[in-house]
Image (cartoon, grey):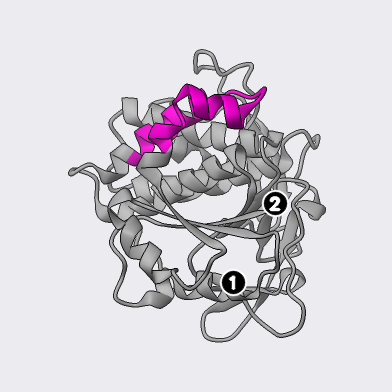
Amino acid sequence: MDVHYTWIGPPPTDRSRDIDEPKRLAARVGKGVKIYFWCLDAQVAGYQRDFAAHSNVTVRGMQAFLTGATTKAYRWYYWYQESDDWAVAAMTDILNWGLAQGTPTSYRAFVKDAWSLFLMYTWGGYVLDAGVGPHGGGAFVLPEPTAFMSPSLTQEDALMMRRFRLSRLAGWQGQGDVTLNEMRADEVCEAMNYGAADDGEGEMCPQIEVWMLASPRYSKGAWAALRQYCVVWKEMQQNNTLVSASAPQVFRYLIAGSVYNGLSHGQNGTAPRSSLWFCQNGQNSTVEVPVLKLRKTYHGSSAH
């Protein structure tokens, strides 16, 4: 099974933000778990030195991987009966945008969100924010995911989501539902130049978080999450609203809605509780996932 971490940009001064938790995880996981640390090609050599003492950590360059994923050899060996062409093309566009001179550096947080969904669909396993690592003593095991999953900060329903079809978007009618926060659905659709969101069904769910995801490779849930994110991003690109005063908020609601779409895909409504890891508050700006013995440390988002 594979666990993925990602850092987009030069290493920070405070290494607790990028490598400390991956190192701690590498020291705790058992045999059969391989950790991938994804970064920009320019930082591969430096991160390889950082993880030199951990044989179960492989550092990979994001740009090189996306380039290699278009070759016939890669497609024949890895993809079998699936086609990742659309996902690779969409992710390549998003990464190039995030690294472009006119894109604020802070927006790389949203590129990482897309990359996490991309990995869930095309690779599978676990995707963890760099601030997520093991805590507590005793045996530590990450179970093989059997469904698309995410953390939840509440056990009770705390969010109203709207489920609808992008009926006025050519080609989307047969692609499935879209789910967005009820209070922000119109805002996301406006950024797409779609107008007001279509009428749809409202449904309540717990407080979904996105700093950890898990999925089997090619799961329908991961597909639904990635597809929604990429479609909205593309429409925003065509509407020239990827960088704006409201874009950071739009992206935050987009990733949460996309993850919820994946959790609830094919479930005849709301996401099953079995697809959520319920969390509890820890000390010093942390949240713990007791069932997995993992802890998320909030360092403060740079995506403003």
- Considering the numbered disc 1 on the image, is that residue within a helix, a strand or a loop? helix
- Depicted 244 relative to depicted 173: above or below: below
- Is residue 37 visible in the rendered image? The answer is yes
Looking at the image, residue 58 sits to the left or right of residue 64; the answer is right
The foreground one among 120 and 190 is 120
Looking at the image, residue 302 sits to the left or right of residue 69; the answer is left
Q: Locate residue 63, reporting x and y percent.
A: 36, 41
Looking at the image, residue 163 sits to the left or right of residue 104; the answer is right
Q: Quadrant of residue 161?
A: top right
Residue at horizontal 50 percent and vertical 37 percent from the top: 229
Residue at horizontal 64 percent and vertical 39 percent from the top: 222
Q: Locate residue 155, reporting x and y percent.
A: 75, 64
- Depicted 231 relative to depicted 203: above or below: above
Mainly helix, strand or loop, the magenta region?
Answer: helix
Amino acid under disc 1: Leu
Residue at horizontal 77 percent and vertical 78 percent from the top: 139
- Is residue 182 visible in the rendered image? The answer is no
Foreground: disc 2 or disc 1:
1
Q: Is residue 82 magenta?
A: yes
Q: Which residue is mark 1?
A: 25
- Considering the numbered disc 2 on the image, is that residue within a helix, a strand or a loop? loop
Q: Quadrant of residue 59?
A: bottom left
The magenta-colored residue range is: 66-95
Q: How many marks?
A: 2
Q: Which residue is mark 2?
A: 149
Few, some or many C-alpha atoms within 10 Å of disc 1 (few <14, some 14-19, many ≥20)? Answer: many
